[in-house]
């Protein structure tokens, strides 16, 4: 290995180690680490995968009103979407999770429908670099994944659609 290449690896390793750090029990932002406010929620259908294969999906843009509280190192609350649904939100060791059931999510060949389980997972990021940044609560990135039940529509393998997800504070 050349000296120049070794130096590049050392710099990369130092930068990676410097940016590593666990997310605290409640991210910064609202009082006591709670995540509160109005946000633009965007799922990028241009980079969607369907059962791990890229397939364009319709982008989804919504406005979320998030209300959370933190007690005993745990943060939880509720998300109200302008699309007409409400779901619970809670913080995990690596970010925030919003989980809900989507009625009539998958249409079967015989015309029947089945529900899907949707999970939004996101974490705070820096606007310029896109790297994890626990010091802010205005921009988040993650995944929007919806999965149908195994055996739905007579097919053993469940349909799983994932899209990159971005959450931006607007108020």
Image (spheres, rainbow, N blue to C red):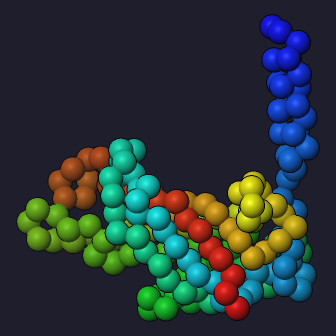
Q: Quadrant of residue 60?
A: bottom left
Residue under the point 81% across and 61% down: 133
| Drawn side of residue 53 relative to residue 78, left or right | left
Residue under the point 40% across and 70% down: 59
Above or below residue 108? Residue 18 is above
Give residue 63's position: percent from left, percent from top. Answer: 55, 87
Number of marks in the rendered image: 0
Give residue 91's position: percent from left, percent from top. Answer: 73, 69
Above or below residue 64? Residue 26 is above
The reply to whether residue 33 is in sight is yes
Above or below residue 134? Residue 159 is above
Q: Quadrant of residue 95?
A: bottom right
Above or below residue 75? Residue 146 is above
Residue under the point 8% across and 66% down: 110
The reply to whether residue 160 is in sight is no
Q: Nearer the viewer, residue 68 or 43?
A: 43
Quadrant where the N terminus is found in the figure: top right
Q: Nearer the viewer, residue 95 or 127?
A: 127
| Drawn side of residue 161 relative to residue 75, left or right | left
Give residue 73's position: percent from left, percent from top. Answer: 87, 71
| Drawn side of residue 31 relative to residue 156, left or right | right
Residue placed farthest to the top in the image? 1
């Amino acid at each position: 290995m050349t000296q120049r290449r070794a130096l590049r690896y050392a710099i990369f390793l130092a930068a990676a180690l410097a940016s590593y750090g666990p997310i605290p029990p409640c991210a910064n932002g609202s009082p006591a680490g709670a995540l509160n406010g109005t946000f633009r929620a965007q799922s990028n259908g241009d980079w969607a995968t369907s059962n791990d294969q890229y397939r364009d999906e319709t982008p989804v843009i919504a406005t979320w009103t998030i209300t959370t509280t933190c007690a005993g190192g745990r943060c939880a609350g509720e998300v109200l979407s302008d699309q007409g649904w409400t779901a619970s939100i809670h913080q995990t060791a690596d970010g925030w999770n919003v989980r809900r059931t989507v009625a009539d999510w998958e249409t079967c060949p015989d015309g029947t429908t089945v529900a899907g389980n949707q999970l939004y997972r996101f974490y705070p990021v820096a606007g310029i670099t896109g790297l994890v940044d626990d010091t802010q609560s205005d921009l988040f990135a993650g995944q929007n994944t919806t999965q149908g039940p195994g055996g739905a529509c007579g097919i053993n393998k469940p349909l799983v659609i994932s899209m990159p997800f971005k959450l931006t504070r607007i108020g």
